[in-house]
Image (cartoon, rainbow, N blue to C red):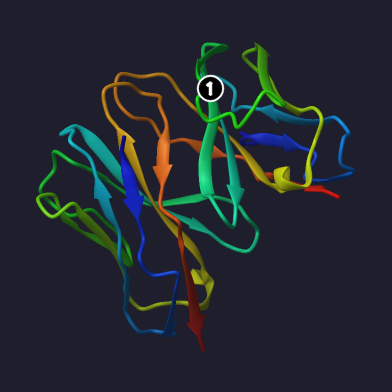
Amino acid sequence: DAGVIQSPRHEVTEMGQEVTLRCKPISGHNSLFWYRQTMMRGLELLIYFNNNVPIDDSGMPEDRFSAKMPNASFSTLKIQPSEPRDSAVYFCASTSPGQVYNEQFFGPGTRLTVL
Amino acid sequence: AQTVTQSQPEMSVQEAETVTLSCTYDTSENNYYLFWYKQPPSRQMILVIRQEAYKQQNATENRFSVNFQKAAKSFSLKISDSQLGDTAMYFCAFFLGGTSYGKLTFGQGTILTVHP
């Protein structure tokens, strides 16, 4: 299996531009998570989906952030407009269904720099 | 809400020696899981070891073992026979049980450097 795939790996943009990050979960996984990693705040969960439905978006910092999961094999995280403080590494993770905890597999992350 | 605290921002160890990374957490729940993740310079998050709260026996994975003290809400990671490839940031994480999905709450991380 290819694992969780994220694109792009690196993104540099200017303040005010729209940014779209993409994630393809592992086939058969039905839960998907978006995390953000910064020096100041560490790793924090932004939003997660189960069966394509957003379950908890309380970590989304503000209305400039939005996430979608139109089908089981694709999700996007969009920032519009972007700001320098959005610079971070964004991780996508997925896990398989079950009655007990299943390991979350992380993608390689997207390093976003907003100038 | 659950919190995870790693009080050691940085640690260093000589190759082949043993090092222990500390982690404490706060929860009022009984059904939960604890994890240690490794993040090398490649940024990839790698699961090192997991511990189910209902298990009294400490988890072990080759050179990695934990000291799980449930009453004290402490979960430390011991790395034996440290290797250069162990150089990474290590995160302690908490997961509340009850479902197969849900949020991982991470500590701030400890940067471990293994010196030759």
Residue nearer the viewer, A114 or B53: A114
Whole-percent x, y for residue B15 in the image: 44, 85
Q: How many marks?
A: 1
Residue nearer the viewer, A108 or A46: A46
Q: Chain of mark 1?
A: A
Whether residue A104 is visible, yes or no, is: yes
> Which residue: 74% across, 29% down?
A22
Whole-percent x, y for residue B24 in the image: 26, 56
Whole-percent x, y for residue B64 in the image: 32, 63
Q: Secondary structure at mark 1?
A: loop
Whether residue A29 is visible, yes or no, is: no
B87 to A89, vertically: above or below:
below
Q: Amino acid at mark 1?
A: Asp
Whole-percent x, y for residue A68 in the image: 67, 16
> Which residue: 53% across, 50% down?
A41
> Which residue: 50% across, 86% down?
B115
> Which residue: 52% across, 11% down?
A51
Instruction: Please give left or right for residue B56 compared with residue A67 in the image.
Output: left
Q: Which residue is mark 1?
A: A57
